[in-house]
Image: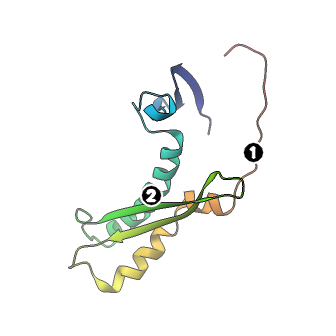
Amino acid sequence: MELTISFPGGQKVNAELNGMVIPTDQPVAAGGEGSAPSPYDYFLAAIGTCAGFYVLAFCHQREIPTDRIVLRQHAEFAATADGKRRLAQVAIEIVVPPDFPEKYRQALVRSAELCAVKKAILDPPEFSISTRVGDN
């Protein structure tokens, strides 16, 4: 998979993947226009939407309606020794309607835990960053 990153102006940084543009911007307080989520917002959203995909797949396999199921994700931050903020915990709560089959509630949690984004965080990849002189 390859993404192309571009700089359309201001604090905006876009990623292009398979012909789709994923726009990012910084909040106004950080010098941006607040016109799009920040890259970190997308990171947090990727966790919740990935878990949501597995919840959706679980329900579809069992023909359980999903229109009244909602995932609520909470991010908790803590200060590091040098005073910076770090992501300390991500909590996801799956809110199901009262008529959701009780026998599937724990299985629904286990399904959400299959999230590939979460797995990538728990077993992080190596990063390699370099420069190259050339035409775009």
Q: Amino acid at mark 1?
A: Phe
Q: Amino acid at mark 2?
A: Gly
**Of the image marks 1 and 2, the number of the one nearer the N terminus:** 2
Question: Element type at marker 2?
Answer: helix
Judged left or right of residue 110, residue 81 is right
Q: Which mark is residue 48?
A: 2
**Above/below status of 36 relative to 67:** above
Quadrant of the rendering where the N terminus is positioned: top right
Judging depth in this view, the residue of 25 and 96 nearest the camera is 25
Q: Residues within 10 Å of mark 1 (few under 14, many from 20)?
A: few
Question: Element type at marker 1?
Answer: loop
Judging depth in this view, the residue of 62 and 34 nearest the camera is 34
What colour scheme governs how the chains and residues are painted in the rendered image of this protein? rainbow
- Which residue sits at x=65%, y=63%? 122
The residue where tag 1 is placed is 127
Judged left or right of residue 122, residue 114 is left
Judged left or right of residue 100, residue 125 is right
**Above/below status of 83 relative to 113:** above
Q: Residues within 10 Å of mark 2 (few under 14, many from 20)?
A: many
The quadrant in which residue 33 appears is top left
Percent of width and height locating residue 136: 66, 16
Percent of width and height locating residue 79: 62, 58
- Which residue sits at x=20%, y=79%? 99
**Label 1, label 2: how far apart the Cα atoms are:** 23 Å
User: Which residue appears farthest toward the bottom when viewing the image?
Assistant: 103
- Which residue sits at x=49%, y=52%? 44
Percent of width and height locating residue 24: 48, 33
